[in-house]
Amino acid sequence: MPTFTPDTIDVTTFLRDHEKKELVRILTCGNVDDGKSTLIGRLFLDAGLIASDALASLEADSKRYGTTGGAIDPALLMDGLQAEREQGITIDVAYRYFFTEKRTFILADVPGHAQYTRNMATAASTCDMAVVLIDATKGVTEQTYRHTAIIALLGIRHVLVTVNKMDLVGYSQAVFDDIRSAFGDCCVRFDFADLHFIPVSALVGDNVVTGSAKMPWYRGGTLMHLLETLNVASDRNLIDFRFPVQIVSRPSADFRGFAGTVASGTVRPGDRIIVFPSKKQTTVRSIETFDGALDEAFAGQAVTLTLTDEIDISRGDVLAHPQNVPTLDDACEAMIVWMGEEPLVDGNTYLLRLGRTETLATVDAIRYELDVQTHHRKQSTQLPLNGIGRCSLTFHQRIAFDSYAKNRTTGAFVLIDRVTNATVGAGMVLDRREENSQGRWQMEPRSKTLRKEESRVESKDREKQWKQRPATLLFTGFSGSGKSTIAHELERKLFAQGHVAVVLDAENARLGLNRDLGFSTEERAENVRRIMEVAKLLNDAGIIALCALVAPTEEMRSHAKELVDSDRFLLIHCSAPLDVCRKRHPKELYRQAHTENVPGISSVYETPQKPDLVLDTERDAAEQCAEKVEELLRTNGILIEK
Amino acid sequence: MSSYSLTHLEQLEAESIEIYREVAATFRRPVLMYSIGKDSSVLLHLARKAFHPGKIPFPLLHIDTTYKFREMIAFRDSFARDQLKLDLIVYTNEDGVRKGISPFTHGSAAYTDIMKTDALKQAITKNGFDCAIGGARRDEERSRAKERIFSFRDAHHRWDPKNQRPELWRLWNTRIHDGESMRVFPLSNWTELDIWHYIHLEKIPVVPLYFAAKRPIVHRKGALIMVDDDRLPLEPGETPEMRLVRFRTLGCYPLTGAVDSAATTIPEILEELLAAKTSERRDRLIDSDQVASMEQKKRDGYF
């Protein structure tokens, strides 16, 4: 059905309808011989995008060049790729433009050859929907898994799995069902909003634009029907307002505006907003456009905001609502698709572009390389061209970002080689806060079949033998406040009296148990959690654990208390002014505060609100402090009088 | 209550505006290549939108080959220069003028090379432009379909289609070294239909040559060529006929063919375009000529 014929519809009516259509970006991928050209050709042919005079010539061409024994070969409509391949020209992504009665489309066609991952990721980064082509005669292949994993990684939520060449398998429902279940298993781990399977014959035309009489068992829509009707507008994030400032507009002394595209959410004049990274607050005065001021701006609109206060804002800053803010940090965890000819190696520094921010970023560690076919994680210290891996990055300044899962704009970045200026990597920020902080404290064990084995030694027998009840003491305070010294002094005293106590020192733990952790707030939390798990094991064995940790936030300390059991937990605050700690600290720590994230200086340290004991480590010597703690242990009945 | 959705033209418009702002934010000395045609009109309109209420923060560059239609030059001067008061640079390859380069004596290929391509490179180098914004669209022809929105040029203005930077999300890589430059195409994702539809909706002024009128025409190699001035050499006994025509694209008058048309309004142009679109698409998509010529080339020893 042609979308426009002057005889049946007048142009003004057509334009009025056409004007309202939304634009949908789709990606098509498949192996060379799966019939992708045929499918796209068929889509255009049956959608009436080819004129009748062109059809006549297609019939002639089909006889001359076609592979169909004289019948119409829709693949011939999609020339180009074949011809250019013969000339040795690399096609990475070919874009095609078409419209139907319902929508307009940009189709990014990714050919299936060597540079696959790079091209797939490039095309997928801007697409709403993906058409994955499977050859019914071959079934699900390794490539299919690879395509799908990349589609999922890049955040496409609508997937149309088109099982082609059904005519060659006798339109068999069994063949289709097998492919569907094999493929379905691999998709369980992905968060697709739509996953449709369509049995088609692109060559004959079944279920591409028109339905098929040969597959009455299939009750779903045709490929075109799904392309025209799946709801992609709901993918847009209209909740978290983020406005990366692209350029400051200052045409005259009395106008100062901040131009950019709303990345997500909505904003209105009068809204209170907070600026990142400065965290200054102000109010939106107006939303300016060439076509007049707006009452509201939403995701996708390019606008200019004016604000009520003259605060310093520049390109790369991010505006948000104060009650819903992005992460502000100098580090992140991300999945990276590597596109550089030279492999990505631990410790390399690149220019990072995230939103409209630019900063240097160092890849501290490649945690693993992902095999997208099997989903196995491979330990690796480098990522080759087209490799995908999880990495931890440090930025050379603090920037505002979100996880890619939440925000496809403020959670995506590219890495640029500083010498060649080549784009060498594409990254997607992972939601580390959920995974590492809150999540791990409360996470259920992965294995569902575990059962706790009980000790054969009674705890009352341990108490009698060692004259103590188990406890965990958490010594918190700035680095250099004396936590470790006091803990060791106490350990010596207790040992001399026949008690059993063990010091767990955070820095020591970083040499072994926690050697994979950095110093961001999230990693500090994980450091605390693991040491608390060890303390708990010691307590279960009747031993007193003396834990010397910065544990900078109340949240960490309350999680720690909960983990080891609040009855056995004592919080000791080693208090000393920061400048005293700075002088006392033997290591270069405080001098590196700008890079190292030091609590109290470049990151937060929350003073404990309800410690069981406060030690003034500026006034009292370590031995005196240890005595005070020993006294606390006696009054709490942890040390039992002989 | 807003539905929080954008139409396809609103989406394309927002994307183009974002591209423009990125250019202004990241290049030292950008320039807008203004060729006076319909795409340039849309390009200019979008630039005004991108920087409102400010002015367009870079100059316009017109490469004047001296054979442009007179109506184009008149439109350029009255609209872009006088009405919008834009900073307009007109550049001509004076060396070519001195040598008397014309499409009649040197052939269209050499003429285009010297008066257009060379002139553009000279203008970019002379003015120290590090970024040239153009109106090319991916749906125009195949080599453009794979061109990036931010397309890198080396110090010799060369494009290396095999070695393009991957372009993900809207995180355009704008980094260049001294002497290198960038070509930027804000209309990459627009189609010809989108351009005319947008001109219609936004009431954007275009050169009157796009509308049908009686014009003096001669036939040259099957094309309808307008006799725009007396430099066009007439064959002995040849007289231009007054014919109702319009132009679908605009360039140098001796090299630009007119089409028979009675379309005098934009909806009429759109109607013509929509009816013709399929055939035009066919030319691009079926292209059996190209397959044939490829085979021919191979037979002739190509490769």
Image (cartoon, rainbow, N blue to C red):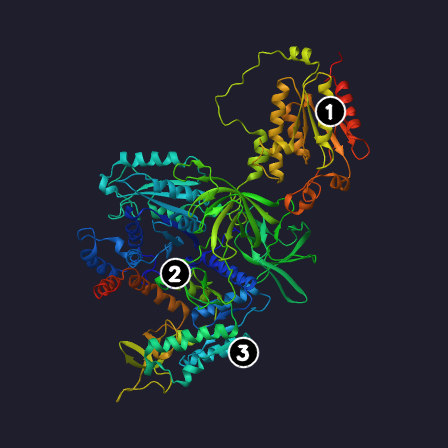
- Label 2 sits on residue: B161
Q: CA distance from mark 1 to mark 3?
A: 87 Å
Q: Nearer the viewer, residue A403 or A456?
A: A456
- Nearer to us of marks 2 and 3 is 2
Q: Is B110 on the left or on the right of B288, as rendered?
A: right
Residue A215: image x %, image y %? 26, 39
Residue A348: image x %, image y %? 53, 48
Q: CA distance from mark 1 to mark 2?
A: 70 Å
Q: Is A445 on the left or on the right of A81, as rendered?
A: right
* Secondary structure found at label 3: helix
Q: Judge whether A470 appears above or below A553 on screen.
A: above
Most extreme residue toward the right, as rendered? A619
* Secondary structure found at label 2: helix
Mark 1 Cα within 10 Å, few/some/many (few <14, many 20+)?
A: many
Amino acid under disc 1: Leu
Q: For residue A432, which quarter of the picture? A: top right
Say which chain tag 2 marks. Answer: B
Residue A575: image x %, image y %? 76, 34
Q: For residue A356, which quarter of the picture? A: bottom right
- Label 1 sits on residue: A490
Instruction: Count the numbered circles shown.
Output: 3
Amino acid under disc 3: Asp
Amino acid under disc 2: Pro
Q: Which comes sooner in the sequence, label 2 or label 3?
A: 3
Badge 2 and badge 3 both on one subunit: yes
